[in-house]
Image: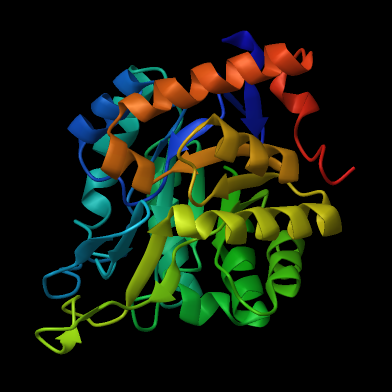
Amino acid sequence: MPLLETSVTGIRLRNPLMNASGILGSRPEHVERLAQAGVSAFVSKSITPEPREGHPTPIIVELPGDALLNSVGLANPGPGVIPGLVETAHRLGIPAIISVAGTTPEDFLKVASIAEEAGADAVELNLSCPHAKGYGLEIGMDPEAVRRVVRTVSSSLRIPVWAKLGVVDRLIEVAGKALEAGAGALVLINTVRAMAIDVYARKPVLGHGVGGLSGRPLHPLAVRAVYEVYREYGAEIVGVGGVFDWRSAAELILAGARALQLGTALVLRGERVVKEILEGLDRYLAETGSTRLAEMVGAAVR
């Protein structure tokens, strides 16, 4: 589908779809499944300097309305898996984006450097995980903390740095600090802090209590975030949040996203959703007389 070709930070993508970090992102066989499904790039689970076990079970629950609530707690096998993930992605002909998490700028740099050495095409800095104490959103809410992390990594690496941001009150300011510090692209948005309570057990459903909400309910928040950040900066943006079909994909692209990540849709509908969305976008381009995807990026803002 040549009409759907796009690029982010100079990385050429044969279509706009990739997986979201945390979805099929920690084993070579996951890369193989995603490549077979038709994604244009592979995004790893967020990797920390040391392996993490994460939060106590249950760590995920399905909610009504095509939504999930998860509290994985950044569980991951550590940096040792990075070379195998990158090698598998490249063997299958798709770029490898390594997601990185930490509590200090030095943590991020340590893992990002390993990713670059392994041949990763870009690193995605997780500055927005809503349910891991000391990680993610606790950094991403502070514009200066975001600037320090992004600057530390981007000034030391040759490969592109993407900053994944969440829904925060000062999103425009935070996004600006990330771009100013050297982020080549912004990934918007992450899951939103939320909770579910078992009315019979009279306690939170998740073992950790608070988790991150994903899926269709997140979509309007993602559209708003992408739209406002693109309108302010014209930045390269990867849109994430509630993409389940071609229409929700097109919304984020029209708001300013050059590429998209799928999370909950892959979990609830399986890998076939990739082909369904791409076929729908291809039809949409033909129906609207567009000759290529790039014509759609930010069209609702202009």
- Tell me where residue 277 appears, x and y as whole percent: 48, 26
- Tell me where residue 219 appears, x and y as whole percent: 54, 54
Count the labels in the image. 0
Give the answer, above or below, for where 251 lies relative to 187.
above
Instruction: Report if residue 214 is visible in the image.
Output: yes
101 or 175, nearer to the observer: 175
Residue at the image position 41 percent from the left and 46 percent from the top? 20
- Tell me where residue 116 appears, x and y as whole percent: 45, 44
Query: On the rendered structure, is 51 left or right of 47?
Result: left
Give the answer, above or below, for where 105 lies relative to 118.
below
Residue at the image position 38 percent from the left and 58 percent from the top? 111
Quarter of the picture containing the N terminus is top right
Residue at the image position 75 percent from the left and 58 percent from the top? 229
Query: On the rendered structure, is 274 left or right of 247?
Result: left
Q: Quadrant of residue 50?
A: bottom left
8 or 207, nearer to the observer: 207
Quick one: which residue is furthest to the bottom in this view?
Answer: 202
Query: On the rendered structure, is 67 left or right of 188?
Result: left
Quarter of the picture containing the C terminus is top right
- Tell me where residue 75 appears, x and y as whole percent: 22, 64
